[in-house]
Image (tube, grey):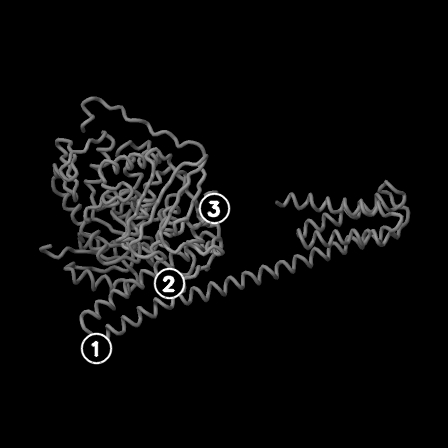
Amino acid sequence: MAKVTYLWTAALVAAATGLGTEWQGHLAAPDVVMLYLLVIGTAAAVFGRRQSLLASALSVLAYNFFFVPPLHTFAVAEERHLLTFVMMFVVGFMMSGLTLRIRKEELRARTEEMRSSLLSAVSHDLRTPLAVITGAATTLRQDPPSLGPERKAELLETICEEAARLERLVRNLLDMTRLQSGALQVRREWVPLEEIIGSALGRLDDQLAGRPIHTDLPSDLPLSYVDPVLMEQVFVNLLENAAKYTPEGTPVEITARPSGAALEIEIADHGPGVAVDAGSRIFEKFSRGQHGDVPGVGLGLAICRGVVEVHEGTLVAENRPGGGAVFRIRIPLPGNAPAVPREVLHEDQKSA
Amino acid sequence: MTTSPKVLLVEDEPQMRRFLRASLGSHGFDLTEATSVKEALALATSHNPELILLDLGLPDGDGIELTRRLREWSRVPIIVISARGRETDKVEALDAGADDYLTKPFGVNELLARIRVGLRHAQQAAGTSEPTLQIGPLHLDLSRREVTVEGRPVHLTPIEYRILTLLAQNAGKVLTHGHILRQVWGPGHADETHYLRVYMAQLRQKIEVLPARPRLLVTEPGVGYRLRDRQ
């Protein structure tokens, strides 16, 4: 990417030179200088500081070579031209400095915006369960006589549920922070996909209760080369989402197949699907689709995409023709899994 | 539980100690509390606990180091309770000699189950090893090398059989990848985790009703495996 912008910068300077020589009869020397300044400004605004400095240097050289007598040499006959060079360079330098400042300012504004949306989302989502826990616990401590055993059990259940919700939120925040700070260590290993999916399903036993889960993993599916802990989190988040956003009792299907030099895994549900325009936005942090009544901060899918991307894979969401959403993960397979030595079986060991 | 098992709790946070004192006390455990490594070492020698619950972050040292020092002379079951949830921390604690690991926050049922497993294994280690093992629907006859699931015989390869017996003899406890690999394949193969994963997948095919939703051979991601002894 960066290299291309340097080439573009050089091309712009060349174009300015071309225009200048083409219209030489109609343009005065200051017009040509203005043309070069335009290029320097463009490079500063569109590409960045280094590119605009390169544009300044190239412009000075080109102007000297093509427009300053003696022509087609880098020699300079009159001293006033040297002044022009210096001025071109200084203007280029100033422009690049200004752009840098504007860019920093923009970045700061964006970070600030992110931080305040994070703060409001987090404070809301931390406070709500805390408020419920505090309320329920203080009620139980007062133990008013009107509080029957049923209500008590209900309050206790609420405390446990809300605490679990807090725990999930904290875990997601920590995951997201690790993912973003680049501090995340990815330990890729050869793992059967079934093991990862199995432990994700095991962690969600309660949330998925009463929901048929169909897993269709071919027995000859190659081992995947992933970080099993991180990928488990991806499946936990996707399945948790399915449990949250689709009607109770509706099935979830998990399928996988090799596809070229990659594994393609699909998690399909029978819920309302994803809003089409939100199709890609749902993977952004704090984006929550249209589910104001379901608790959550909107970090789950952002984490999923982040994790899949550190595996050089892709994660997309689509609606299925028959209704429901499908999340499709594609994880590249770098070559074949190392062989596992086969056991040599003697006749008497076969029924061990 | 006829007598109150003596449990040593090593934890520096007062709220955590209060919660455990209340819940373990009400389940008939005789709880002693230590708030530092120094105190824990003293009480472990003078008090002779039957099980130790250990927090890792202590004011005067690290719980993992404490585990290593305790293991120099004691086989008392150690269950780590820690807020450090990273897999490397768990593996380090287990490799240092801890018997199990619970990440905070945890429910009291989970803790009680792990304590029972720890106490049971300590008793078994003291007595003779059982010739047969029954774990849920799984039955192992070690003298005849026979395995059945709900009465149905299962044919295992020698490696599969060795992995399963190792897990069964430690039912309810998490065993790290490295530990199983060293025990089954030998010390030179401790890092060949994919061997173990492939054999575990085969074992699940033979033992689990739904291999993709295992009920017995449970994965502890990034750490190892556990044979679940309660449904």
Please identify, in this view, whether the residue under mark 3 or under mark 2 is nearer the observer. 2
Pointer 3 or 1: first along the chain: 1
Residue A295: assigned label: 2
Q: Residue furthest front?
A: A322
Q: Amino acid at mark 1?
A: Pro
The residue at the point 43 percent across, 59 percent down is: A298
Q: Residues within 10 Å of mark 3 (few under 14, many from 20)?
A: some
Residue A309: assigned label: 3
Please identify, in this view, whether the residue under mark 1 or under mark 2 is nearer the observer. 2
Pointer 1 or 2: first along the chain: 1
How many discs appear?
3
Instruction: Give the Cα separation between the discs numbered 3 and 1.
Output: 54 Å
Q: Which element type, helix, strand or loop, lies under badge 2? A: loop
The residue at the point 30 percent across, 33 percent down is: B187
Which quadrant is the C terminus of chain A positioned in?
top left
Q: Amino acid at mark 3?
A: Glu
Between A99 and B149, the one lying in front of the other is: B149
